[in-house]
Structures are given as structure tokens and as C-alpha cells.
Amino acid sequence: MSTEELLAIVVDKSVDARGTACPGPLLEAKKAIGTISSGQIMEVLSADEGTKKDIPKWANKKGHEYLGTVEESGFFKIYLKKG
Amino acid sequence: MTMALFSGSIDKLTGAGVVLSGAAADDMDIDVYVLLMAARSFVKGNEKKVDGLSEYPELKEEFFKSLETLKVSTWIEFFEMAKELTNVKIHICSLAGKMWGGEKMEDFIDLADDICGIGEYITSAQEADVHLFI
């Protein structure tokens, strides 16, 4: 998905993990995805560089769909659709 | 996954906690076997006194400052989070426990699930897909 398409998404859940280093964002994502339903979309906000690869790989392995990442100033947003 | 946790130093316990958290996020079943030096950190009253480093002991101040700056969880918090997320069992080696004054379950912090012998650890390690020694 393009950056414009990702930013246009009305997410069902937003997780702000910018205050934590690895593995904080992954753990926050793991906990939060359990609270939404299949097909719903979640964004994870992180400033931890390792999370950019970590969460997409984890999501695909766990059967969720990685939609893309948007760079913001000093952090990024990772978009996932629950499988 | 099985983890032989031999070291009771804060750097290795923290590292073990990070690995445990990652495995827990992956929904792995995890058995942690607490061996000789690590058992001291699981005896009640010792868990918050752990502050020695196995690696670069002269950099202790820098290590703790970085943990604080990066808001890294404590080793106990990592272990607790892993137990909340998945099936993590923490087994205390009976010999190791005795070495540090822990003989019964009530002698150990709540993270501990049982006291075991070395045979159980070896069998579990043989059966696991992933085995780590820290």
C-alpha cells in the first residue's frame, strides 16, 4: 500500500510504543493484537529501528497481514491487519 | 524452547529476559532451568540485589544508566511479561537452590514453578527444537 493509502486508514487500534526499546514494541503489539478481531487494523508507533523489521516478520509468521510502514518525524507507524 | 540459565548476573539475566520475551511473543512453550549461579537470584530477598555484571564489570554505571535512559524493563519484569504471554515454566535446580539457601518452593520468588533434578533438564533439552545456555 502507498503512504497515502496507509495514512487514510481509520485504524481500529493504535499502540504507542515510542517510549520503549526492543523488545517493548513487539510485546506491546503482541498484547494489543489480542484485543482486536480478525480483519481489523492496528497501527504500532515506534522509534526503535529494529522494530521496523521485527514486527512485520512476527506478523507474517503469526498469520497477520503486514500492510506497510510510514515514516514520521522521529518515529514510524507500522500497519497490520489481524489474520 | 529450553533455556539453561546458569548466570545470575544482571547483564545476563536481562539478556535472558529479552530472549524470553521474544520467544513468548512467538507463542513458544518455554522451560527455563535455573542452574548454579542463577539460582541465587531466584531466592527470595536476592532478586533486587542482583547488580553484578559478567561482562565488562567496570562499565556497571554506564550499563545501568543506559537501561534507565532506554526504559528497559528489569529482568524480573521481562520474566513476568513472558509468563503472561505464553507457557513459561521456571524450574529451579535442587542442588543450585540448596547452595544459596533455598530448599522449598516458599524459599523462592513467585516466578519459580517447581524444583527439579538434572535429569528433567536433560530430557527437556533433548526434546526441544531450540536450546539456549546463558
Image (tube, rainbow, N blue to C red):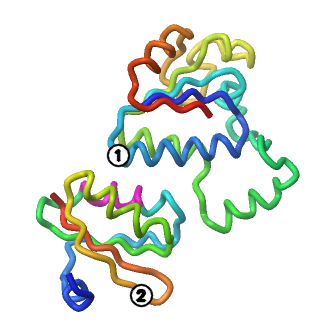
Q: Nearer the viewer, residue B107 or A71?
A: A71
Is residue B95 shown above or below A78?
Answer: above
Please give the residue where the numbered disc 1 appears in the rendered image: B26
Please tell me in which quadrant of the rendered image residue A71 appears: bottom left
The quadrant in which the C terminus of chain B is found is: top right
Is residue A2 shown above or below B59?
Answer: below
Please provide the residue range marked out in magenta.
Answer: A26-34
Residue located at (64% from left, 11% from top)? B103
- The residue type indicated by label 1 comes to Asp
Q: Nearer the viewer, residue A76 or B116?
A: A76
Is residue A32 shown above or below A70?
Answer: above
- The residue type indicated by label 2 comes to Glu
Q: Mark 1, chain letter?
A: B
Secondary structure of residue under mark 1:
loop
Residue located at (37% from left, 44% from top)? B85
Residue located at (70% from left, 41% from top)? B48
Is residue B64 shown above or below B21?
Answer: below
Q: Position of residue B120 (x, y in %)?
A: 48, 11
Secondary structure of residue under mark 2:
loop
Q: Mark 2, chain letter?
A: A
Q: Position of residue B132 (x, y in %)?
A: 53, 32
Dominant SS in magenta: helix
Please give the residue where the numbered disc 2 appears in the rendered image: A72
